[in-house]
Image (cartoon, rainbow, N blue to C red):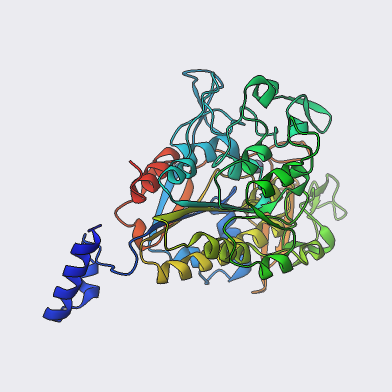
């Protein structure tokens, strides 16, 4: 961009020669006189591959409708990659949110479960938020997960294992009674950075909004009286805990909002809380014409999740974050917004939950684009961290005429869409109580600022480079 003096001169020239500023603005030269700041708004749909987008589009706006996402002028594909947990490790083709968020936040590929640290030797990778902070930019993280969960954590914390979210979870972490590892060498007593919630409380972030209050309740390591939340307050964060408090908060300098103990409740759920179920096959048909029948799960609609009541929406959190981050005296800001439960609800085989979270992402995008419309040097990117299990499959099998029962070995949800059709969503990555991620490319979308800056096919570390270059952090 030109400096202020040149911008003023060119603007005057444009006025004098009566040339349309719109025409000039289409070239390489940025002539925007009112906004010398540069901002990046990065929206991550966790697990939001094209299957999840298509399922949500069909339900939310119909097969002939278009999501706001679909209207963005730039669209490409992003390759996902992890490596084994050792120096120079071989490629691992299916990722998790920790290593993928690390790639986007730092430009480095690492192993599954790591938060902005190097596979093999735990070296710390600086994040886009930390680099921006050093140059005076304001920074914020918004998520419908716990703010200590992998995606937001990777932008502002460093840890060998994502489960080390609070001071009491630094040693012998269990998940469903199974030992998952620890971060004993990363406590402050061992010279480490302390848990993820402590790192957030002691970070230079200006806005942190989402779930995860339980991770801020333990005492800060080494303190006999101060919880992590109190440590955050002492560091200058104003804290809020409800949608009403968020709506009333004044124009504070730093804001920490924690609206639920862990992941925030989702907006939609299956009818009476239903999720995908197993088809039932009978190998003896009552008419004896065929060898058997299949009873598919009963169709259902999506309904409002009562637990969502009282929660701020993702767009309300986005608006609050933008209001606080946009300050005239700063060179701009970096904001990451995550719609987390597209992924988490897919793990639980709950397609309605994923659909509602994608709707939330679409609304947050509307907030971001409205901001960008009045702040021209704002790059808006939307992408996903990895693909997920849910697949859109036929309502009637192509092979239904065969004289044997044909059915999925996985779980199936059949959803009645508002436009009157049925949609079948299949989950079949394993036989456990939770589904797995998958390894396909994910999409990336961008506003006008992304055109010419984001290749149509790129790897996740290149997203970091695009954001760093846009904010001129070299
Ligand atoms: Zn996941």
Quadrant location, the N terminus: bottom left
Quick one: which residue is furthest to the left in this view?
17
Number of marks drawn: 0
| Residue at 32% across, 51% down | 453
Residue ID at (67%, 62%): 356
Q: Position of residue 246 (x, y in %)?
A: 68, 65
- Above or below, 431 against 450 in this view is above
Q: Image quadrant of residue 39?
A: bottom left
Question: In the rendered image, which quarter contains the C terminus?
Answer: top left
In the depicted view, which residue is nearer to us: 387 or 114?
114
Determine whether, in the image, residue 472 is placed left or right of residue 49.
left
Q: Is residue 207 above or below residue 109?
A: below
Image location of residue 368, percent across then percent down: 49, 64
As displayed, is residue 143 above or below residue 18?
Answer: above
Inspect this view and state whether residue 324 appears. Answer: yes
| Residue 67 percent location from the top left of the image | 52, 67
How far across and down, in percent of the image, does residue 450 sit?
36, 56
Q: For this rendering, which residue is in front, 393 or 209?
A: 209
Which image quarter has ligand 1? top right
On the picture, is 443 further left or further right than 142? left
Q: Is residue 319 above or below residue 136?
A: below
| 141 displayed left or right of 180 | left
Query: In terms of depth relative to the viewer, which is nearer, 126 or 467?
Result: 126
Asked if one can make out residue 341 in the rendered structure from this viewpoint, the answer is no
- Viewer-side residue, 353 vs 246: 246
Say which quarter of the image contains residue 468: top left
């Amino acid at each position: 961009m030109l400096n202020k003096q040149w911008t003023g001169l060119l603007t005057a020239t444009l006025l004098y020669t009566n040339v349309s500023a719109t025409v000039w603005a289409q070239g390489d030269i940025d002539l925007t006189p009112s906004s010398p700041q540069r901002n990046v708004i990065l929206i991550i749909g966790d697990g939001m591959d094209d299957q999840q987008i298509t399922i949500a589009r069909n339900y939310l706006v119909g097969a002939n409708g278009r999501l706001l996402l679909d209207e963005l002028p730039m669209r490409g594909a992003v390759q996902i990659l992890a490596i084994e947990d050792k120096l120079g490790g071989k490629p691992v083709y299916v990722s998790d949110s920790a290593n993928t968020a690390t790639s986007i936040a730092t430009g480095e590929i690492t192993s599954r479960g790591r938060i902005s640290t190097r596979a093999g030797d735990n070296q710390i990778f600086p994040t886009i938020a930390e680099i921006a902070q050093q140059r005076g930019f304001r920074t914020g993280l918004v998520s419908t997960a716990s703010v200590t969960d992998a995606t937001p954590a990777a932008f502002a914390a460093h840890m060998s294992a994502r489960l080390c979210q609070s001071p009491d979870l630094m040693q012998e972490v269990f998940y469903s009674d199974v030992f998952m590892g620890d971060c004993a060498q990363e406590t402050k007593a061992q010279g480490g950075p302390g848990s993820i919630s402590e790192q957030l409380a002691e970070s230079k972030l200006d806005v942190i909004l989402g779930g995860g209050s339980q991770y801020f309740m333990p005492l800060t390591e080494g303190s006999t009286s101060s919880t992590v939340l109190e440590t955050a307050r002492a560091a200058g964060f104003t804290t809020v805990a409800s949608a009403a408090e968020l709506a009333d908060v004044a124009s504070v300098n730093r804001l920490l909002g924690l609206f639920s103990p862990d992941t925030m409740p989702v907006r939609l759920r299956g009818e009476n809380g239903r999720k995908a179920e197993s088809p039932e096959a009978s190998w003896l048909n009552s008419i004896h014409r065929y060898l058997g029948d299949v009873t598919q799960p009963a169709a259902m609609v999506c309904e409002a999740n009562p637990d969502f009541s009282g929660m701020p929406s993702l767009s309300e959190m986005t608006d609050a974050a933008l209001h606080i981050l946009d300050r005239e005296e700063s060179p701009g800001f970096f904001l990451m917004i995550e719609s987390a439960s597209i992924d988490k609800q897919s793990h639980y085989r709950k397609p309605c939950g994923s659909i509602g979270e994608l709707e939330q992402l679409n609304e947050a995008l509307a907030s971001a684009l409205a901001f960008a419309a009045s702040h021209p040097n704002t790059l808006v990117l939307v992408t996903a961290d990895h693909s997920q299990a849910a697949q859109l499959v036929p309502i009637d099998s192509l092979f239904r005429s065969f004289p044997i029962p044909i059915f999925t070995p996985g779980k199936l949800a059949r959803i009645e869409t508002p436009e009157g059709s049925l949609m079948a969503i299949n989950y079949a990555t394993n036989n456990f109580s939770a589904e797995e991620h998958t390894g396909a490319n994910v999409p990336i979308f961008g506003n006008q600022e992304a055109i010419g800056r984001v290749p149509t096919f790129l790897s996740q570390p290149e997203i970091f480079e695009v954001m760093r270059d846009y904010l001129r952090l070299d």
